[in-house]
Image (cartoon, rainbow, N blue to C red):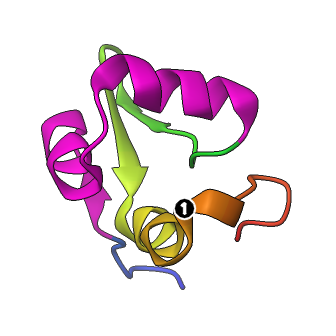
Amino acid sequence: MRGSRLPILRILTVLKRTGLSRSTMYRKMGNGTFPGNIRISTRCVGWRESAINVWLRNPMFYSTESGE
């Protein structure tokens, strides 16, 4: 996939799409029930849009171990 770009979502977009609060999202990340973020730069992180879409399809049974 060299040269292809995957959309990266910033935190406000993720919170709006998921309806979660910031603290709930980070708690779920810690529990492994929400996709992890990726570092964009020194003080900036984002989430892969594809990972958020997978979570949105089945948030109740999502696990970072299985990716679904």
Three-letter amino acid code of the residue under disc 1 = Pro
Along the viewing direction, whichever of 29 and 47 lies nearer the viewer: 29
Above/below status of 29 relative to 6: above
**Range covered by the magenta-colored residues:** 7-32
Above/below status of 32 relative to 60: above
Where does the N terminus fall, quadrant-wise?
bottom right
User: Residue at 85% across / 55% down in the picture?
Assistant: 65
The x, y position of residue 63, in whole percent, is 75, 55
Q: Is residue 48 left or right of residue 35?
A: left
User: Residue at 57% across / 49% down in the picture?
Assistant: 35
* SS for dot 1: helix
User: Residue at 14% across / 37% down in the picture?
Assistant: 12
The x, y position of residue 10, in whole percent, is 22, 42
Q: Which residue is mark 1?
A: 59
Across the whole image, how many numbered discs are drawn on residues? 1
Magenta segment, principal secondary structure?
helix
Is residue 48 inside the magenta stretch? no
Along the viewing direction, whichever of 46 and 66 lies nearer the viewer: 66
Is residue 19 inside the magenta stretch? yes
Q: Is residue 37 left or right of residue 34?
A: left
Q: Is residue 25 left or right of residue 21?
A: right
The x, y position of residue 50, in whole percent, is 44, 73
Q: Is residue 51 left or right of residue 11?
A: right
Outermost residue toward the front? 60
* Quarter of the image where one finds residue 48: bottom left
Quick one: label 1, few (<14), some, or many (20+) residues within 10 Å? some
Above/below status of 1 relative to 33: below
Where does the C terminus fall, quadrant-wise?
bottom right
User: Residue at 83% across / 66% down in the picture?
Assistant: 66
